[in-house]
């Protein structure tokens, strides 16, 4: 019979190490951890766990007791970064905290913390010296952070919004179900569903005026708006799908039929116009007609000629 | 022996010897792959254990490590008869939300069109991938970016050739013609709409044009006596086009290297563009939609209007067919 023996106490220590590398553990947590493990059948005392902690410490795992919990302060994966990596990491951190500003994504900031804690000795020294990181003038922002936070909160609350946007001398009022914020260059945009006009819209948050939250909840949760278009010829052969697109029909030599979901209508029109005669909107009919009307609007600019 | 180990050997050690063996082997394998003989030697030299370890014990320890989630290759000819630790679970895992945040950061950075910065960010993400225990997440970090199909060796060479205006023979996979060899005088590399292009003079088509960098499969230098003058002559003969931008297009306008603003006004700007490649310029102007009006020269304005009418015609044609 094949030998299936396992170093059991070793396995228990490994399980504790695995859990400690993810979060602090109390003695009770450790007891529960090994008791819950079906593979381990013995009953354990606190003394046993002290022994395990001593063993881990002896091999260089820095474990401290803080508020009745054991915390591992060093990490097992030590990483080495080049000077350029360090400068980019500094820059990313700044971008994440000051530009991206998605404070709700604490996991991202936590992850960057972990990366910083995992640096090897040599990298730690150089990391302390390179305090600035890459400087990139375009990232000196035009984004008002308070405004970003406000709109982030609107997205989280999931309540409908009513606001105005200036279009030339006209003030246009919108009722929107906010979905998410999008970062493009130095601008932050609000993406939302314009439920009165049944289309997704993208607004530069800086342009949004007189914004107020309505008491109604957004209803779009599972709402998806599809627009189908066909690209052909050369474009069909080199088309790179966007994240909100899927191919629904392919003719190897001639065309691709693409389904696009929830893209802001203005941005979509601008993009499809760029494709010229190699693109045609198929469905829905309303969007197709709107597109033709939009081309007429451009042609009207040249009427006097 | 480390000072910590020395202190502990002096006092009565309250440790788990089995646990110590397991952790010691893990640490040894983390440093580098080890053969059984190397493991036995390391155990024998260890200040705490001070004795070797049997084959069976090594097997049991490896089994415990695997059970806990370590991926360890068994010693065989392909591993040079060594145990190889490929992955372990003792790390804070990159979770889906953090991954999503990292991707958003990278997309935001890519939108600035600075491919060199994006390249540097990708290099750091390769390090981050070590924290992704889920192979799907690692793949996202390593592959889901705008430069994913770029051969960096080719890119590096091209950047150096652009400065020197060297003539190149390029093996190019054209979307229409398939594989073809082009003689090309490279001018510069550009990153637009998440795609990298090589701009220059195409001797086959006798015009300034651009190639998608991910479609360049091979290149070598060749000799063309007038490389510099051909490129410069074509550039100086290029058409000058002016257009007016209003609305958000005016606010968000970023000139390409072929453009500059000639008139700036609170309500509009007028841009002068050099049309090195007419197709490319028409595409750009179309992407501004109704916020753009082409002003001069009149022949180009006519061409632009014709392009718009041709697009509209597709829909009219379809309407007639349906009725």
Image: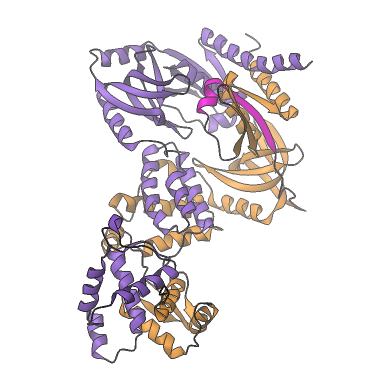
Q: Is residue A23 above or below residue B8?
A: above
Q: Please tell me which residue lies in front, B62 or A276.
A: B62
- Left or right of B137 on screen, residue A120: left
Task: Residue B68: name its quadrant.
Answer: bottom left
Q: Please tell me which residue lies in front, A51 or B74.
A: B74
Q: Please tell me which residue lies in front, B258 or A140.
A: B258
Q: Residue lying furthest front in this view?
A: A1
- At which x and y percent is residue B22? 35, 75
- Residue B1 in sight in this render: no
**Residue found 55% across the figure and 78% down from its top:** A36
- Left or right of B268 on screen, residue B69: left
- Left or right of B200 on screen, residue A183: right
Q: Chain in orange?
A: A
Q: Chain in purple?
A: B
**Residue found 31% across the figure and 64% down from its top:** B83
Q: Please tell me which residue lies in front, B101 or B6.
A: B6
Task: Residue A165: name its quadrant.
Answer: top right
**Quarter of the figure that contains the C terminus of chain A:** top right
Q: Is residue A267 above or below residue A2?
A: above
- Residue A7 in sight in this render: yes
**Residue found 53% across the figure and 81% down from its top:** A35
**In this picture, which residue range is highlighted in magenta?**
A218-242
Task: Residue B147: name its quadrant.
Answer: top left
- At which x and y percent is residue B101? 51, 52
- At which x and y percent is residue B14? 34, 89
**Quarter of the figure that contains the N terminus of chain A:** bottom left
Q: Residue lying furthest right in this view?
A: B323
Please tell me whether residue A223 belongs to the stretch shown in magenta: yes
Q: Is residue A195 above or below residue A270?
A: below
């Amino acid at each position: 019979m094949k030998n299936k023996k396992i170093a059991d106490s070793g396995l228990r220590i490994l399980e504790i190490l695995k859990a400690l590398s993810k979060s602090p553990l109390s003695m009770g947590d450790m007891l529960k951890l090994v008791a819950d493990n079906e593979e381990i059948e013995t009953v354990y005392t606190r003394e046993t766990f002290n022994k395990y902690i001593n063993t881990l410490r002896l091999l260089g795992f820095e474990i401290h007791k803080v508020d009745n919990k054991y915390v591992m302060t060093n990490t097992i994966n030590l990483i080495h970064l080049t000077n350029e990596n360090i400068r980019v990491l500094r820059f990313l951190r700044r971008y994440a905290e000051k530009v991206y500003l998605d404070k709700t994504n604490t996991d991202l900031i936590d992850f960057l913390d972990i990366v910083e804690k995992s640096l090897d000795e040599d990298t730690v020294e150089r990391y302390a010296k390179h305090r600035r990181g890459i400087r990139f003038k375009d990232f000196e922002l035009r984004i008002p952070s308070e405004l970003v936070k406000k709109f982030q909160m609107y997205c989280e609350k999931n309540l409908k919004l009513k606001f105005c946007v200036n279009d030339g001398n006209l003030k246009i009022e919108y009722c929107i179900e906010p979905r998410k914020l999008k970062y493009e260059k130095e601008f932050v945009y609000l993406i939302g569903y314009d439920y009165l006009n049944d289309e997704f819209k993208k607004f530069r948050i800086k342009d949004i005026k007189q914004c107020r939250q309505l008491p109604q909840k957004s209803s779009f949760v599972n709402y998806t708006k599809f627009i189908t278009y066909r690209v052909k010829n050369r474009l069909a052969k080199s088309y790179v799908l966007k994240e909100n697109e899927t191919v629904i029909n392919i003719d190897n030599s001639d065309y691709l039929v693409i389904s696009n979901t929830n893209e802001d209508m203005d941005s979509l029109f601008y993009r499809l116009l760029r494709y010229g005669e190699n693109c045609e909107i198929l469905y829905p009919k309303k969007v197709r007609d709107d597109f033709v009307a939009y081309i007429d609007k451009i042609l009207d600019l040249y009427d006097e000629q | 022996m480390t000072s910590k180990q020395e202190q502990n050997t002096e006092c009565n050690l309250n440790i788990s010897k089995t646990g110590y063996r397991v952790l010691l082997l893990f640490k040894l394998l983390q440093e580098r792959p080890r053969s059984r003989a190397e493991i036995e030697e390391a155990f024998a030299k260890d200040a705490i254990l001070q004795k070797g370890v049997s084959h069976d014990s090594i097997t049991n320890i490896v089994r415990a490590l695997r059970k806990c989630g370590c991926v360890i290759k068994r010693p065989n000819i392909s591993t040079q008869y060594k145990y190889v630790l490929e992955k372990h679970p003792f790390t804070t895992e990159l979770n889906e939300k953090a991954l999503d945040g990292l991707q958003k950061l990278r997309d935001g950075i890519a939108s600035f069109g600075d491919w060199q910065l994006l390249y540097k960010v990708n290099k750091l993400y390769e390090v981050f991938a070590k924290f992704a225990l889920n192979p799907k997440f690692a793949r996202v970090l390593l592959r889901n970016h705008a430069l994913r199909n770029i051969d960096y060796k080719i890119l590096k060479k091209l950047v150096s050739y652009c400065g020197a205006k060297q003539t190149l023979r390029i093996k190019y996979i054209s979307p229409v013609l398939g594989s073809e060899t082009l003689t090309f005088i490279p001018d510069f590399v550009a990153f637009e709409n998440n795609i990298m292009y090589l701009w220059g003079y195409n001797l086959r088509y006798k015009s300034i044009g651009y190639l998608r960098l991910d479609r360049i499969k091979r290149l070598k230098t060749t000799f063309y006596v007038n490389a510099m003058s051909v490129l410069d002559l074509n550039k100086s003969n290029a058409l000058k086009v002016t257009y007016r931008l209003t609305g958000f297009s005016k606010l968000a306008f970023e000139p390409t290297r072929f453009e500059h603003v000639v008139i700036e006004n609170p309500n509009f700007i007028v841009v002068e563009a050099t049309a090195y490649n007419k197709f490319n310029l028409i595409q750009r102007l179309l992407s501004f939609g109704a916020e753009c009006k082409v002003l001069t020269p009149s022949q180009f304005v006519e061409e632009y209007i014709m392009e718009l009418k041709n697009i509209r015609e597709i829909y009219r044609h379809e309407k007639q067919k349906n009725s």
